[in-house]
Amino acid sequence: MDKKIVFITGASSGFGLALAKMYINEGFTVYGVGHTDFSLEGLNYFTCDVRDYDKINEIINSIIEKEG
């Protein structure tokens, strides 16, 4: 079975949070980023500014390394 993985920006509020909850409920591995500290069961969350290209690149590379 293929892994179902999703990466969401703005995952701590609004539409991003709604998407995170939906994908978690559907059994996806969910990674998200946002600019505030946040916690949600089932969400692998990183705090950072999405305009920080180097940090986003670092996060995505760590996810690829972990998930394959």
Image: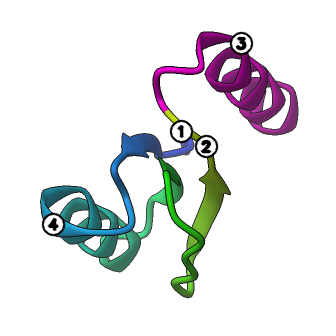
Mark with earlier residue (4, 3): 4
Would you name the residue on which mark 4 appears? Answer: 14
Q: Quadrant of the N terminus?
A: top right
Would you name the residue on which mark 3 appears? Answer: 54
Q: Residue furthest bottom?
A: 41
Residue 52 percent across, percent down from the top left = 59, 20
* Residue type indicated by callout 3: Asp
Q: Quadrant of residue 54?
A: top right
Mark with earlier residue (4, 2): 4
Would you name the residue on which mark 1 appears? Answer: 2
Mark with earlier residue (1, 2): 1
Q: Which residues are magenta?
A: 50-68
Mark with earlier residue (4, 1): 1
Mark with earlier residue (1, 3): 1
For the residues bearing labels 4 and 2, Cβ distance under 8 angstroms: no
Whether residue 21 is in magenta: the answer is no
Q: Quadrant of residue 67?
A: top right
What residue is drawn where x is 61% and y is 43%? 48
Determine whether the residue tagged by mark 2 lies in a helix, strand or loop: loop
Q: CA distance from mark 3 to mark 2?
A: 11 Å
For the residues bearing labels 1 and 3, Cβ distance under 8 angstroms: no
Provide the major secondary structure of the magenta segment: helix
* Residue type indicated by callout 4: Gly
Residue 10 percent across, percent down from the top left = 33, 50
Q: CA distance from mark 4 to mark 2?
A: 17 Å
What residue is drawn where x is 47% and y is 30%? 50
Q: CA distance from mark 4 to mark 3?
A: 25 Å
Would you name the residue on which mark 2 appears? Answer: 48
Left or right placement of residue 68 versus residue 9 in this view: right
Q: CA distance from mark 4 to mark 1?
A: 29 Å
